[in-house]
Image: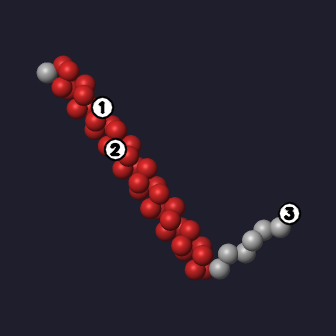
Amino acid sequence: MEFVKLTEKQMKARRNRNIALGLVLAGLVVLFYAMAIVRIGGGMG
């Protein structure tokens, strides 16, 4: 099996893209969690 050798610049770009994607996913999780808390809290109050 052949592997592609990435340059330092490509590895840095990939790492930055992965970090950005992780932050977006974490933000969505927090947003959905907050929406669920508001819905549950609003229904009980």
Q: Amino acid at mark 3?
A: Met
The x and y percentages for residue 41 are 20, 26
Above or below, comparing residue 31 to residue 42 in the picture: below
Q: Is residue 31 left or right of residue 1?
A: left
Q: Is residue 21 left or right of residue 44?
A: right
Task: Please give the name of the residue rendered at 18% of the width and 26% of the height, measured from the top-left corner.
Answer: 42
Above or below, comparing residue 44 to residue 5 in the picture: above
The x and y percentages for residue 19 are 47, 62
**Mark 2, other Cα within 10 Å: few <14 / some 14–19 / many ≥20:** few
| Element under disc 3 | loop
Q: Earlier in the sequence, mark 3 or mark 1?
A: 3
Q: Amino acid at mark 1?
A: Ala
Residue position marked by numbered label 1 in the rendering: 36
| Mark 1–mark 2 CB contact (< 8 Å) | no
Q: Specify the farthest residue to the right.
A: 1
Measure the alpha-carbon separation of dots 2 and 3. 40 Å
**Mark 3, other Cα within 10 Å: few <14 / some 14–19 / many ≥20:** few
Which quadrant of the figure has residue 24? bottom left
Which quadrant of the figure has residue 1? bottom right
Residue position marked by numbered label 3 in the rendering: 1
| Mark 2–mark 3 CB contact (< 8 Å) | no
The x and y percentages for residue 39 are 24, 28
Residue position marked by numbered label 2 in the rendering: 30
Which quadrant of the figure has residue 29? top left
